[in-house]
Image (cartoon, grey):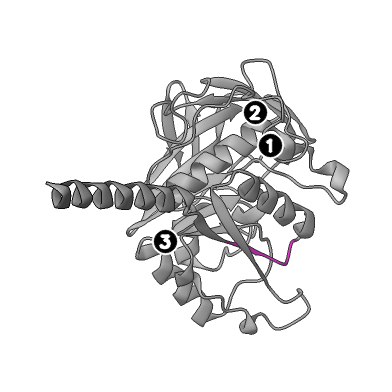
């Protein structure tokens, strides 16, 4: 009897320790950054790092490319070491070796998050454009795929000719969830106000295996359609989450778009989903709502919550 009790005790202790170890395991993440066209890559990537680390769910390494005026071929990080790769990048196209390595990483089940201007580069990299679903600028036009937007209650794939990528002056805009039961959005308010940001519009691309999660009405652009702001892509076994929000200006005080609670929470939930296929995070009390925006100034949950 004593042996049975001892065995049960050891088994229970092992289960408890295993659960604790599992709970403590963090999602191993790499942020790819180092070049940008019109954004402050240092500030933007640092903001993303703080958001991820402060959540307690992610451990983060930075992979910084050589400057624009230097050879990009030396940049070849080991993507396979990570559960998640986050792009805060807008520069040169990687070498063929690095491109192949990244494609294999995603196809074999790696998680990917693309933030804001990270949909602008790599217009000459077909596989990346499939991974991203859509992009803007970089000479993209009808040859790269349709415009995708929400109109009259459904997704529209518009193959009309024309360039891709547009944004006007920064302003606040309402985000509307189109797939509220998706794990990334489940339980969150269906409408909420995002703080001042660049509203990217006229995105187009392959749009294969893509699901639009949320849109915004571009009141200062085309008044007849809602532009995608959040979407996912399945590429091989890999999962991709894209957010067009998160502009970073050229000063620490100009990262207000990234301070928006809605941006941070959807980023964290999208990142966990891309890496693991599920979302374990609870809906926070400070999430914005219809007509109301909230900020997390320190890129973390306020101390009073």
Q: Which residue is mark 2?
A: 218
Closer mark to the observer between disc 1 and disc 2: 1
Q: CA distance from mark 1 to mark 2?
A: 8 Å
Residue 93 sits above or below residue 216 on the image: below
Residue at the front extreme? 2
Q: State yes or no: discs 1 and 2 in contact (Cβ < 8 Å).
A: yes
Residue 288 in the magenta stretch? The answer is no
Closer mark to the observer between disc 1 and disc 3: 3
Q: Position of residue 124 (x, y in %)?
A: 55, 68
Q: Nearer the viewer, residue 305 or 166?
A: 305
Picture quarter containing residue 216?
top right
Which element carries disc 1, helix, strand or loop? Answer: loop
Tell me how many marks there are.
3
Q: Nearer the viewer, residue 14 or 274?
A: 14
Q: Residue at x 65, y 28 (%)?
A: 218
246 left or right, relative to 230 = right
Q: Position of residue 282 (x, y in %)?
A: 49, 30
For the residue carrying disc 3, how many other residues have a C-alpha within 10 Å: few (<14), some (14-19), or many (20+)? many
Which element carries disc 3, helix, strand or loop? Answer: loop
Residue at the left extreme? 1
Q: Which residue is mark 3?
A: 110
Closer mark to the observer between disc 2 and disc 3: 3
92 left or right, relative to 150 = right
Looking at the rendering, the stretch of residues picked out in magenta corresponds to 30-36
Q: Position of residue 274 (x, y in %)?
A: 44, 50
Q: Which residue is mark 1?
A: 199
Which element carries disc 2, helix, strand or loop? Answer: loop
Q: Quadrant of the C terminus?
A: top right
């Amino acid at each position: 009897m004593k042996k049975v009790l001892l065995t049960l005790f050891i088994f229970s202790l092992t289960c408890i320790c295993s659960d604790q170890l599992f709970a403590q395991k963090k999602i191993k993440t790499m942020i790819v950054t180092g070049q940008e066209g019109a954004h402050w890559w240092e500030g933007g990537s640092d903001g993303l790092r703080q958001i991820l680390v402060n959540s307690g769910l992610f451990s983060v390494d930075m992979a910084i490319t050589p400057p624009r005026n230097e050879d990009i071929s030396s940049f070849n990080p080991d993507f396979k070491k990570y559960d998640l790769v986050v792009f805060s990048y807008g520069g040169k196209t990687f070498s063929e070796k690095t491109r192949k390595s990244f494609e294999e990483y995603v196809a074999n089940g790696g998680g990917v998050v693309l933030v804001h201007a990270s949909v602008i580069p790599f217009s000459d990299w077909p596989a990346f454009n499939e991974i991203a679903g859509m992009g803007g600028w970089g000479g993209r036009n009808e040859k790269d795929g349709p415009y995708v937007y929400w109109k009259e209650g459904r997704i529209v794939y518009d193959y009309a000719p024309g360039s891709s990528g547009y944004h006007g002056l920064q302003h606040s805009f309402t985000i509307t969830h189109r797939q509220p039961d998706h794990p990334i959005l489940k339980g969150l308010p269906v409408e909420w106000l995002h703080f001042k940001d660049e509203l990217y519009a006229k995105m187009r691309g392959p749009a294969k295996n893509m699901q639009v999660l949320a849109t915004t009405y571009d009141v200062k652009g085309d008044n007849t359609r809602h532009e995608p702001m959040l979407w996912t892509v399945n590429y091989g076994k890999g999962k991709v989450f894209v957010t067009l929000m998160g502009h970073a200006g050229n000063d620490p005080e100009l990262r207000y778009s990234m301070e928006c609670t809605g941006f941070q929470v959807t980023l964290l939930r999208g990142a966990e989903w891309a890496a693991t296929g599920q979302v374990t995070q609870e809906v926070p009390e400070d999430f914005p709502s219809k007509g109301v925006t909230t900020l997390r100034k320190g890129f973390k949950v306020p101390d009073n919550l």
